[in-house]
Image: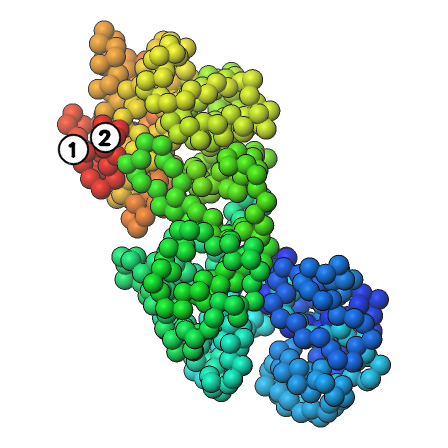
Amino acid sequence: FTLSAVMNIDKSFSSLAYVLLTNKKNAKVVKVALQQNGLLHKLYRMSKVDVESLCYFQPSSISLDVAPASSTSDLWPDCIAIPIYKEYKDILNSQWIGNDGNASNITEESDKGDKMPSKTLFSDEVSKLIIGMAQQMCPYSTSVLGNAKKLITSMPRSDDDGSESLNFVQTILHQVLMDFINMFNTDGQIPSKNLSSRLKTKISEQSNNITCPPKLEVMGDCRTLVIPCRALNLNSNLKDDNPCFHKLMTSIASEFNLTKCQPDDLNNDGENIKSITKSEDAYLSGMEASDVIRDLMINLWKMLAQAHRSKRVVRRGEIDPNSKVRESGHSIIWMACENHQEESGPGCKGWITITEQGIKQSFDLTKVMFSRGNISEKIRFGKLVKEDELILDMYAGIGYYTLPALVIGKAKHVYCCEWNPHAASFIRFNLKQNKVYNRANVLEGDSRVRLVEEDILRLDFDRVSLGLLPSSEGGWETAVRALNDAKGGWLHIHGNVPSHERDDWALWVCHQLSIVYYKIYPQQDSDHVHVLCHHIERVKSFAPKVDHFVLDIFVGPILPVELGLELGGKQIGIINQNGNFVECGVELPPPSCALGNGVLDQEWMM
């Protein structure tokens, strides 16, 4: 665990721990007894029994209270879970919560490896107050969360056998695997000596930060957990140089004898077994011990979800850059419940709301894409917009830039165009829930066609957003036509551009826009035309050595006074990073990201 990873842990972060269960009224007495005997785990705090994460339960044979009969029992809400050190789990299981019911004198190692003096764990009176022992997700104590270094040193590390430390996801995977192996190793066929260390070594050697990332993304107000496309993926056909998770799981199933387990042995209820999706289930076809690995993966999703306080796990999909509608490739791989009546829209399985700067953005994450990395650009765009401006959003999505223009910028009116019918319905919903629906019009379809059909281009827009990636080149002529022909206006052009081509791309775009402008206005005095890129904003990294940039370009006959620039007559070029004007050349070669000229191409935009 790195310091930076720990600093991102929120105050409700939890982890799997062993606990003693007692009635709420007896919790203080039991906690004091644990504390006095050095059994109370200082890393965690007491909490209610978490039925959803309860994955192990051993009832006490001498308790005065009756243990709940099942995980759905109404008695659980009256129980409190008190965290204990792992070392005492086996001692209590075999010697104290055993059938003889006698308290035990023990000498054992603490978490720090110190030998502890022989002592009686509890008095008979305290022993009878404990319902049993269990394992569940426990929240970290406030004192530990307030000290990042203390949290790092307190988190589980590898055994002292030279094996490498595991990251958080690897640790959860290790715990789930250990639970399954112990569940099926009732006949002792798998030697228990160094079992944990052997498993850690295998996970460490056969996975990396791609297949088992150290940190996972939590998305939306509902805290949906997002698994990267290539992480924890059983697909054996992934074409890359990373360790194969499919191979790791197959190897573990074989080495630790999981191939002989039967589905009926598994401790999962029917609802959870149904929770794994067909897309994930397809990877198990023909795989050795597929039934066991299926249920193991379901438990892994469940444990990861509980550790992040999530009730839904999705796998991130890849978006086809040649897709006209930019559909999401996300798929839901686990859900805590499946009581969703609607197939689409609010209430469906994929419905999510993401609130940014007070702006609510709701959509079905299996239907449309969403990028959290664009938040700073959304805010910047909203602040650029002025109250009396008429705005055109040619690629609106679910309202990424339309909503900031209306909510932050207080735009007079926004016309938003969207090709994806799902996204078009979601932006209508978002306009209503943000209470700005009366200042917007949604045009569904190709913006280049719909704006002409509806005669919208005559409205003289002050600002046009072209937020399509990797390139919006096919819409530049329409955007220039939409601007106020008397005084001009602003284009905000997004693009995925090789980092070293930043300024060359900006100069080329300005040159191309000037050609478009003279095509539209052939009679315009060439000495009074400005195509000026006033600012280049780097939004985020798109890929190695490729960045998402936005160009703020003014196009028109009269430069805005607020720019404070005195550039004379005709000016076509950019303001560079030093604040100097750089004029476009007469002939500029197209950059590698130009349409029809490289790997970032979109054929459908030609």
Residue 294 percent across, percent down from the top left: 45, 62
Vertical comparison of 271 with 395: above or below: below
Residue 436 percent across, percent down from the top left: 57, 22
Label 1 sits on a secondary structure element that is loop
Q: Can residue 116 be seen?
A: yes
Query: Who is closer to the viewer here, 531 or 318?
Result: 318
Which residue corresponds to the image point at 38% horizontal and 40% vertical from the top-left? 538
Quick check: 432 left or right of 590? right
Quick check: 141 left or right of 589? right
The kind of residue on which mark 2 rests is Trp
Which residue corresponds to the image point at 26% horizontal and 16% vertical from the top-left? 517
Query: Residue lying furthest top in this view?
Result: 523
Which residue corresponds to the image point at 41% horizontal and 22% vertical from the top-left? 444
Q: CA distance from mark 2 to mark 1?
A: 8 Å
The kind of residue on which mark 1 rests is Pro
- Rendering quarter of residue 496: top left
Disc 2 target residue: 508
How many discs appear? 2
Label 2 sits on a secondary structure element that is helix
Which residue corresponds to the image point at 27% horizontal and 26% vertical from the top-left? 474
> Which quadrant of the figure contains the C terminus?
top left
- As drawn, the label of residue 355 is none
Disc 1 target residue: 589
